Image (cartoon, rainbow, N blue to C red):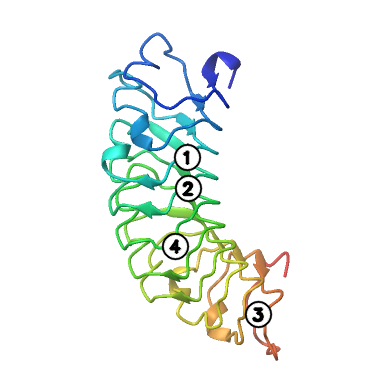
């Protein structure tokens, strides 16, 4: 990516981005960085901001360190060309169900370091519908429970980052049938992980469970994990680890 592909407007006290701001006169634009401004909503970037021209769905929009408080269906209209959306360190506490449903090409969304305490079952429905390699980062928020259906069965999530919340429970069916190779739930408050969709994690490469209060691991949890390379179970409350616990983990590199 060259400078001609990029527009950076960091810390410019921008409050609104008008229709047509990044229209046809910038045909090669691939990255727009509006971090550190005064945007209070995604709707502050008006729906015609990028024009109506056809795009290759490779646009990266970075909105870190703004004042965005919520994400709604209305606020994401006109942003279907996005491939990556950075919302780190905002003030987001509410995400409407279906807020991402028009972002069919979104491959990466960073919601870390916000104030999110709850995710409803259809929060991410439709996200990355045309992509089969999605990364969702909800680390360093205020989540206490992952509800059934939040990460729905039709989501092809490659990497799910739930690091550093206050998660005590993961409901059955909350992250079932998604195609994970990385799951990071370190630095939470989990005691019982038997409810995790172990049968749907057969293709997992990287599993991070450290810094919880996990008290028990069973052989069944790791059966069929033929691709598992890194397993972090450090800083938990495991009394005894069975000698046959990791039988069959032939690709393990780090434990």
Mark 3 lies on residue: 246
Mark 4 lies on residue: 117
Quadrant of res 247: bottom right
The tally of labels here is 4
Pointer 4 local density, CA inside 10 Å: few below 14, some 14–19, many at least 20: some
Place of residue 42 in the rendered image (x, y in percent of width and height, measured from the top left):
37, 36
Question: For the N terminus, which image quadrant?
Answer: top right
Q: Is label 4 in contact with label 1 (beta carbons under 8 Å)? A: no
Residue 91's tag is 2
Q: Is label 2 in contact with label 1 (beta carbons under 8 Å)? A: yes
Of labels 2 and 1, earlier in sequence is 1
In the rendered image, the vertical position of residue 95 relative to residue 23, given as above or below: below
Place of residue 213 in the rendered image (x, y in percent of width and height, measured from the top left):
62, 80
Question: For the C terminus, which image quadrant?
Answer: bottom right
Q: Is 211 left or right of 168, judged from the image as shown?
A: right
Of labels 4 and 2, earlier in sequence is 2
Of labels 4 and 3, earlier in sequence is 4
Place of residue 158 in the rendered image (x, y in percent of width and height, measured from the top left):
48, 53
Quadrant of res 230: bottom right
- For the residues marked 1 and 3, what is the alpha-carbon distance in whole angstroms? 46 Å
Pointer 2 local density, CA inside 10 Å: few below 14, some 14–19, many at least 20: some
- For the residues marked 4 and 3, what is the alpha-carbon distance in whole angstroms? 35 Å
Label 4: element kind: loop
Which residue appears at 64% of the width and 84% of the height? 245
Foreground pick, 56 / 145: 145
Mark 1 lies on residue: 67
Label 2: element kind: loop
Residue 49's tag is none
């Amino acid at each position: 990516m060259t400078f001609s592909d990029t527009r950076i407007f960091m810390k410019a006290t921008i409050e609104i981005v008008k229709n047509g701001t990044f229209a046809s006169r910038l045909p090669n634009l691939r990255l727009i960085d509006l971090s550190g401004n005064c945007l209070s909503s995604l709707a502050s970037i008006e729906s015609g901001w990028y024009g109506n021209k056809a795009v290759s769905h490779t646009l990266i929009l970075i909105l870190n360190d703004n004042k965005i408080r919520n994400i709604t269906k209305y606020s994401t209209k006109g942003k279907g060309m996005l491939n990556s959306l950075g919302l780190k360190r905002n003030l987001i506490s509410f995400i409407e169900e279906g807020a991402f449903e028009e972002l069919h090409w979104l491959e990466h969304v960073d919601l870390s370091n916000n104030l999110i305490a709850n995710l409803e079952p259809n929060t991410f429905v439709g996200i990355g519908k045309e992509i089969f390699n999605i990364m969702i980062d909800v680390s360093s928020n205020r989540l206490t429970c992952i509800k059934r259906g939040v990460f729905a069965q039709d989501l092809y999530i490659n990497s799910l980052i739930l690091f550093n919340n206050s998660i005590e429970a993961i409901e059955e069916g909350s992250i079932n049938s998604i195609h994970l190779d990385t799951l990071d739930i370190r630095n939470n408050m989990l005691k019982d992980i038997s409810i995790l969709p172990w049968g749907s994690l057969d293709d997992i490469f990287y599993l991070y469970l450290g810094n919880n209060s996990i008290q028990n691991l069973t052989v069944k949890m790791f059966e069929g994990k033929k691709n598992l390379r890194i397993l972090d179970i450090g800083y938990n409350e495991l009394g005894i680890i069975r000698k046959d616990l990791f039988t069959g983990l032939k690709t393990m590199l780090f434990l």
